[in-house]
Amino acid sequence: MSDTALNLAVIVGWPVAPVAMVLIMLGWQATGYLWDHDDFDRLSRRPHRRRCVAEWRRLREQFGRYVGEDVARRALQHDTEMGGQERDVAVLFVDLVGSSALVTSQRPGEVVKLLNQFFQVVVDVVHRHGGFINKFQGDAALAVFGAPLEHPDESGAALAAARELRDELIFVLGGTRFGIGVSAGRAFAGEVGARNRLEYTVIGDTVNEAARLTEVAKTDGGHVLASATTLDGAQDAEALSWDLGELVKLRGRAAPARLARPAAPPRAIPRGPMPHLAGAGRQRH
């Protein structure tokens, strides 16, 4: 059995077990054609090899949909094992208010459809700014800038993404409240878990601060809060688009943090509304 297929099965785990099983069944046949022959045009002259290469590409794309294209490429090109490194990253956390009421008032299929629309907006904006969606958590999402690939201005990219995401979500969600928090600093980035179930993630105080900022942002009129240290690490073009605010004591943190808010007010983005989700958001608080 191919080492590549085994590594894929390990990093993916149960959420994409069918994809991993297909990779294992292909075994040496698929991986041999992929890694031992770089000239795909030459391979395409043989029908059975052309089918094999096409299938491998399809599986790689499917794998990337679950763990992210950059993480999938990392797993395919290198041996995957527990471990990573500390690096400078920026973290964006976005959390939706109102999903609890939505679950009690709507059919499960409708809830999933509306959440998928919400997450699509998040994914599109984050990817446009060079970020990586680390995970979806119920009605929230965690995005990372600067890992697994380095970014020339991870803080500025996260701040710009936060402003654009606020504008789009205000239009899409209608009256539903949400919070976006942005923080930057050192964090561990790499694989954690067990030998038979790994996950690429980021861990550190930077992630915790972003989550705490999101909690405060849910009740803040501007929907978005960043730490002043995030502005310090951003290039001037983006840092000048934010205003420094008051010092606050974030939950679970000893030192107070100075808040920063976008200087410009939200602008309307022409996207389709989500009326059911907007109504649920008003019911919760």
Image (spheres, rainbow, N blue to C red):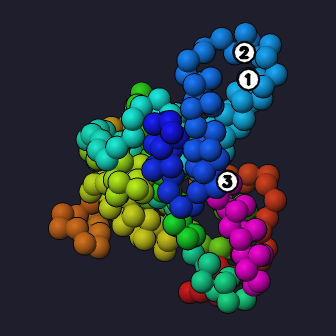
Q: Mark 1 points at which residue?
A: 49
Q: Are marks 3 and 1 in contact (CB under 8 Å)?
A: no
Q: Residues within 10 Å of mark 1 (few under 14, many from 20)?
A: some
Q: Residues within 10 Å of mark 2 (few under 14, many from 20)?
A: some
How far separated are the C-alphas under marks 3 and 1? 38 Å
Q: Residues within 10 Å of mark 3 (few under 14, many from 20)?
A: some
**Magenta stretch: dominant SS?**
helix
Q: Which callout, 3 or 1, points at the residue further toward the start of the chain?
A: 1
Say the numbered circle drawn on residue 43: 2
Q: Which callout, 1 or 2, points at the residue further toward the start of the chain?
A: 2
Residue nearest the viewer, comparing 35 with 278 = 35
How far separated are the C-alphas under marks 2 and 3? 39 Å
**What secondary structure is marked by label 2?**
helix
Q: Which callout, 2 or 3, points at the residue further toward the start of the chain?
A: 2
Q: Is residue 108 located in the magenta-colored stretch of the structure?
A: yes
Part of the protein shown in magenta: 106-127
